[in-house]
Image (cartoon, grey):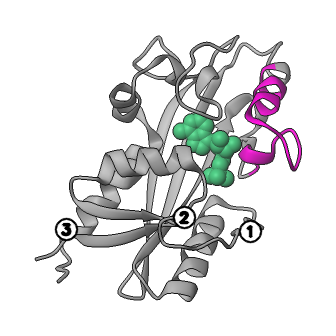
Amino acid sequence: MGTMKLIAATHNPNKAREIKRILKYRYEILTLEEAGITESIPEPWDTLEENAYQKSSVIYSITNANCFGEDTGLEVTALDGRPGVKTARYAGENATAEMNLAKLLDALKDKDDRDARFRTIISLIVNGEEYRFEGVCEGKISKEKSGENGFGYDPVFIPNGSEKTFAEMGDSEKDKFSHRRKALEKMGSFLEKFEFH
Ligand code: IMP
């Protein structure tokens, strides 16, 4: 039995790095770059589920290969679940992570309730069928940013069960808590029942 090849439908090098380190023992993961795909994939929808499916279905239509897309949102309780599906564009269409973070800390500056969760949805297409997996990490938004590792909102997100932000953790410590790791593991277990040659 050969190693199954899967295309990860992301252009985000940070996500690709996490995906590879979590799945590398079981699957051969190709990023879009490695698969020679340069198309940018729009995320036009109002839910993580639809955006994840957009990514997998666009890549499947180009390659006809087994692939998955993932979409992640940060859902903050005191902001009624925002930024949610708009997490990447919270401070505007071309916002940097720095700008998004600053906007989030500002929106929460008078709030005692710091509860938040990261939610990842994976849309997997295997043998032409679609399957979805969810990973959630509950936690809190810190008062200030702290730490240099990771990406995006990592400097302000403290997962429940830790005192550190994701950005203060090493890779394996983040993976222990992370939404993306949980969704990827569910997909990995599901795929074990398929045989690929
Ligand atoms: P998208 O899934 O590519 O739409 O990205 C959603 C947004 O969430 C981006 O701004 C990312 O930087 C951010 N994000 C996604 N995953 C993580 C994470 O694990 N830590 C911190 N920020 C993340």
Residue type at mark 1?
Answer: Pro
Which of discs 2 and 1 lies nearer the camera? The answer is: 2
Structural crowding at the residue carrying mark 1, measured as other residues with C-alpha within 10 Å and reported as few (<14), some (14–19) or many (≥20): few
Q: Is residue 187 above or below residue 161?
A: below
Mark 3 or mark 1, which has the lower sequence index?
1
Q: Is residue 11 above or below residue 116?
A: below
Q: Is residue 72 on the magenta stretch?
A: no
Q: Mark 2 and 1 residues: CB-CB less than 8 Å, in contact?
A: no
Residue found at x 84% / y 41%: 95
| Relative depth, front residue between 28 and 52 | 28
Residue pointed to by mark 2: 33
Residue 17 seen in this snapshot: yes
Residue pointed to by mark 1: 42
Left or right side of 43 for 197: left
Residue pointed to by mark 3: 192
Residue found at x 21% / y 53%: 25
Q: Which residues are magenta?
A: 86-105
Mark 2 or mark 3, which has the lower sequence index?
2
- The quadrant holding residue 131 is bottom left
Q: Picture coordinates of residue 1 (x, y %)?
A: 10, 77
